[in-house]
Image (spheres, helix red, strand yellow):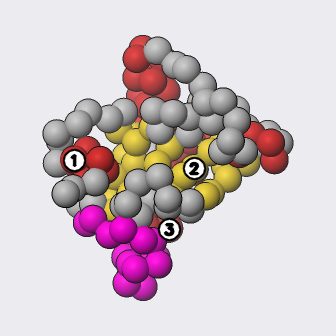
Amino acid sequence: MASIFSRIVAGEIPCYKIAENADYLAFLDVFPLKKGHALVIPKKETDYIFDLDDKEYLELMSFSKRVAEAITKSIECKRISLHVVGLEVPHAHVHLVPINTVNDCNFSQEKLKLTKEEFEEIARLIASNFK
């Protein structure tokens, strides 16, 4: 069975897309810790990030870096934290979370509740800063 992320890649489930190329996709997390919290995935379904071959892994990290730079230009924050948890969806992915304190990247905290319009505006802003 395809993961929810593979279904997003296939266009079966909508997302708030912020960047994409032939092999990788970045979109807003719909259960964000902070405004601008994004997920970066390889389009090829691979369960565990360390199952990616070296080329895919390095390309995922490079694409994630570019997404992080776009988030930094769009969302006021001190840093972008990068997390690989990998338990919640069986598809390799990176969380990029804008932070001002270490507590901002605590995944056990209550998630933000944003409107569709807020998600769309954040996605548009980050996408406009993606190079």
Report the residue marked by disc 2. Answer: 96
* Cα gap from disc 3 to disc 2, whole angstroms: 11 Å
Report the residue marked by disc 1. Answer: 7
Magenta stretch containing residue 101, yes or no?
no
Q: Which residues are magenta?
A: 44-59
Residue 52 visible in rendering: yes
Disc 3 secondary structure class: helix
Q: Mark 3 against mark 1, which lies toward the viewer?
A: 1
Contact, CB < 8 Å: mark 3 with mark 2?
Answer: no
Q: Splitting the image into 4 quarters, where does residue 57 fall? A: bottom left
Left or right of 79 in this view: 24: left
Q: Amino acid at mark 2?
A: Leu
| Mark 3 / mark 2, whichever is N-terminal | 3
Contact, CB < 8 Å: mark 3 with mark 1?
Answer: no
* Cα gap from disc 1 to disc 2, whole angstroms: 21 Å
Q: Splitting the image into 4 quarters, where does residue 47 fall? A: bottom left
Q: Residues within 10 Å of mark 2 (few under 14, many from 20)?
A: many
Left or right of 74 in this view: 48: left
Left or right of 86 in this view: 102: right
Identify whether 3 is placed above or below 59: above
